[in-house]
Amino acid sequence: MRDDYKLKGATAKITIEVEKEVAENLAKMESYSKHSQSELTNTALKRFITQHKDFLPPKEPGKN
């Protein structure tokens, strides 16, 4: 399961703002788990997207 956190594809840099407590907890998680903040954040966002597909625009017919 530890490999589930590895970045597997092309990457892109983004800049976001999060609540201070979220940033502090992310730093603690990075230190404790030995996964980078990028790996933890990528995994969390992928899980969020999977659960909230309603936030995405509808797919056009015939397009993947």
Image: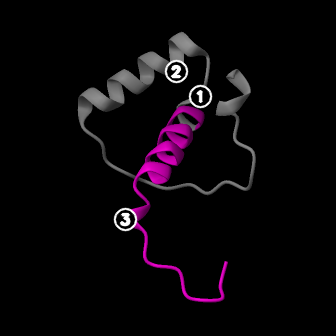
Q: Is residue 43 above or below residue 29?
A: below
Element on which disc 3 rests = helix
Query: Which residue carries the number 2 mark?
Result: 30
Quadrant in the picture for the N terminus: top right
Q: Residues within 10 Å of mark 1 (few under 14, many from 20)?
A: some
Q: Residue 31 at what x, y percent from top left?
A: 52, 14
Nearest to the observer: residue 64 or residue 28: 64
Real-space CA distance between mark 3 and mark 1, rounded to the nearest whole angstrom: 27 Å
Query: Which residue carries the number 3 mark?
Result: 55
Decide: marks 1, 2 in contact (CB < 8 A)? yes
Element on which disc 1 rests = loop
Real-space CA distance between mark 1 and mark 2, rounded to the nearest whole angstrom: 5 Å
Nearest to the observer: residue 43 or residue 25: 43
**Mark 2 or mark 3: which is in front?**
3
Per the rendered image, the range of residues in magenta is 39-64
Residue type marked 1: Ser
Q: Is residue 7 left or right of residue 58?
A: right
